[in-house]
Amino acid sequence: MALARETNWSALLVLLSCFCLEFGSAADTITAAKFIKDPETIISDGGKFKLGFFSPVNSAYRYVGIWYAKIPVSTVVWVANRNNPLKNSSGILTISEDGNLVVLDSQKRTLWSSNVTNSVSNSSAQLLDSGNFVLKENTTGTIMWESFQNPSDTFLQKMKVSTNVKTGNKVQLTSWKNPSDPSTGTFSTGIDFHSLPEIFIWNASSPYWRSGPWNGQIFIGIRNMNSVYLDGFILTDDEEGTYSLRFSFSNDSVISNFVLKSQGNIVRPYYNGENWEVGWSTLESECDVYGKCGAFGSCNSQNSPICGCLRGFEPKNIEEWNRENWTSGCVRRTPLQCKRVKTGEEEGKQDGFLMLKTMKVAAFADWSSAFEDKCRTQCLENCSCLAYAYDSGIGCMSWTGNLIDLQKLSSGGLDFYVRVAYSELGGWFLISTEIFLKNIDCSLFRGNKPKIPGENEVGDKISQVKLEELPVFRLEELASATNNFHESNKLGQGGFGPVYRGKLLDGQEIAAKRLARSSGQGLQGFMNEVVVISRLQHRNLVRLLGCCVDGEEKMLVYEYMPNKSMDAFLFDPVQKKLLNWRKRSNIMEGIGRDFGMAKIFGGDEDQANTKRVVGTYGYMSPEYAMEGRFSEKSDVFSFGVVLLEIISGRRNTSFYYDEDAMSLLGFNVSLVFMSPGLEMWNAGNIVAVVDPMLMCEPCSESEILRCIQVALLCVQEFAEGQDYYLYCYFHA
């Protein structure tokens, strides 16, 4: 009987010890008397977080860490002994004799300590429902140490990252070395303060990413921050010089945080009920890497290549630049006026500013409280000032050193003004003490625009153009689309001027023609031609997308042809082999939409390239050339010329009539008659008109003849006959 009673008491003790162990593991507090051993845990009072021992994926080492308690997919948010792991499962987390938190191994050796110098023996550690693990004095409740002030790689709600501008003390995140090793990695992130607070990621001690300055609501260098962070961040400063950043979600049920990954990017994962998903990342493109394009370079992820020099600058090392190594950046082409004055050179016209839209501004801005107009003036009057920007939530920002980490943003950002020499400004926005043009509308449609002497009728001319047929573009819009008209986007050069490929914000690809300043064409002449060109194109088939006028800068915007122009194939002895009769027939049917090649000419212009808006002499109709009459029928003439070129495979290289040479057009007109074309075909003379390439393949003689007849109807000397062409071609 006594033996039975002893056995019952032993069983009861075992049950009680199990109960106590379970109760201890469910508590949220550790004391010197109530410690935890691997694999025991404690859990926060609200059940959100758990603290205990864990092993990372693909690792046998043991660490003390904190993770979400109710999520089956383990996600560690803090690690104690990250740089000194336990080799086995014999670890202990307890309070030492001096009152510090310590991790001990099986030999009672300290692998990690909270290392509080003024600790007291009467202390305890508690895991809060925020995920913060605090060491406090038991009598007063004073917190002596907390995990939120000693974070690992994860930024939780109510946690603060901070920097003290007086003492240099920082609270910042550091990455894991890799997913299997939580030891301190090479990347860290926190607040940097030059004269404005912003978030940086550092690779060792070198900047790797930055957020742009804080404007009271968002970091202005982060795309879509207004929409991504609906609950917002809060950045505060105190009298001691500490700037602190925290965030919170209005919905407490949201499980999300920010993590600095071992690859160097900050991600925002959120738990969807089954798995973790990434909702945002700092590194969305190559342009997000700090200083990708070097000094005075700008990065645009929508361009290829992504880097370009600012206007007025050129690559410092062209060989590296061509290898897509842009880190050496760009250098100024023309010295600024201040530099010329200092060196005793002749003083030129005043420097100005180039405006760049929707930009992530350069790093390390200087701040002043000046309003926008004064901000501009301050920079212009300071020879060391190279750029400025203004934000209503920040004030005036200026830069005196190299402009690093400029980036074109798809949304958000600021207008950024770069100081350049007067000669580099051209038709760009001039910002000086005498003139300040901001957000200028290049359409010239505004009623309050000052009248230009000798051009009083310009507004009347422009008003004749239907806006739905001819949109207008702002200069900065086209500059952004072409990466500031970068040489890498240049498609070609004609008498009109250079042509640049670009992409608008909506994805539309364009070809922007810039009128050469040497053309001498005035605004009224340019707009007259724009009016004519716009009228010569059908509303639903228009290829002239619009125009832009700003000062001396005049441009036409066309659809971009990704497969190059037809002449690149038609007049190339090798490439023309790709154009059999069926393809040429399809081209001729499709090219009916491509009117607008004829134009207004000056009498002294070269026949191969004109210096004004569009076109080449060989395509100009005789009724305009001889009598000055211009209509939609003028473009019918041009269409006929193109048809003859496609059929013959030869370029119409000169004017309709030239005393010294007979053009392809003149040759064809003299060779083939309107009505008895089939008789000439039967006589064999038609062979001289058709491209020999076409004679080597089976094709319809009647089709070729019909196309020649249509073409010749288009190039009649009398425009009235071209109505017959329209009937024949569109009803055949």
Image (cartoon, rainbow, N blue to C red):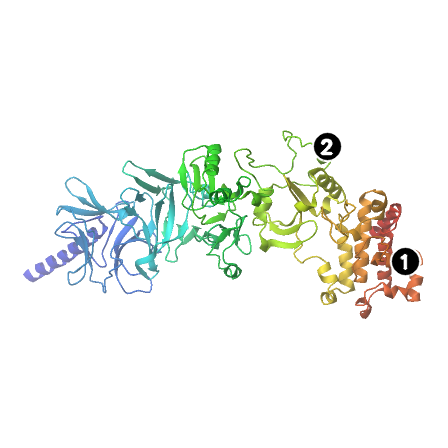
Quadrant containing the N terminus is bottom left
Which residue corresponds to mark 1?
A: 670
Q: Position of residue 519 (x, y in %)?
A: 70, 45
Q: Secondary structure at mark 2?
A: loop
Which residue sits at x=53%, y=36%? 432
Q: Is residue 653 left or right of residue 709?
A: left
Q: Residue furthest bottom?
A: 696
Dot 1 or dot 2: first in sequence order is 2
Q: Is residue 376 left or right of residue 479?
A: left
Count of numbered badges drawn on the protein: 2
Q: Residue furthest top?
A: 448
Q: Answer yes or no: is residue 1 visible.
A: no
Q: Quadrant of residue 8?
A: bottom left
Q: Position of residue 459 (x, y in %)?
A: 70, 33
Residue closer to the observer: 27 or 209? 209
Quadrant containing the C terminus is bottom right
CA separation in Å, label 1 and label 2: 44 Å
- Name the residue type under label 2: Glu
Which residue corresponds to mark 2?
A: 457
Q: Is residue 498 left or right of residue 232?
A: right
- Name the residue type under label 1: Ser
Residue closer to the observer: 477 or 107? 477
Q: Secondary structure at mark 1?
A: helix
Which residue sits at x=86%, y=54%? 659
Q: Residue furthest left?
A: 2
Q: Answer yes or no: is residue 355 visible.
A: yes
Q: Is residue 152 left or right of residue 340?
A: left
Is 658 rendered above or below residue 381? Answer: below
What is the number of the mark on residue 689? Answer: none
Q: Residues within 10 Å of mark 2 (few under 14, many from 20)?
A: few
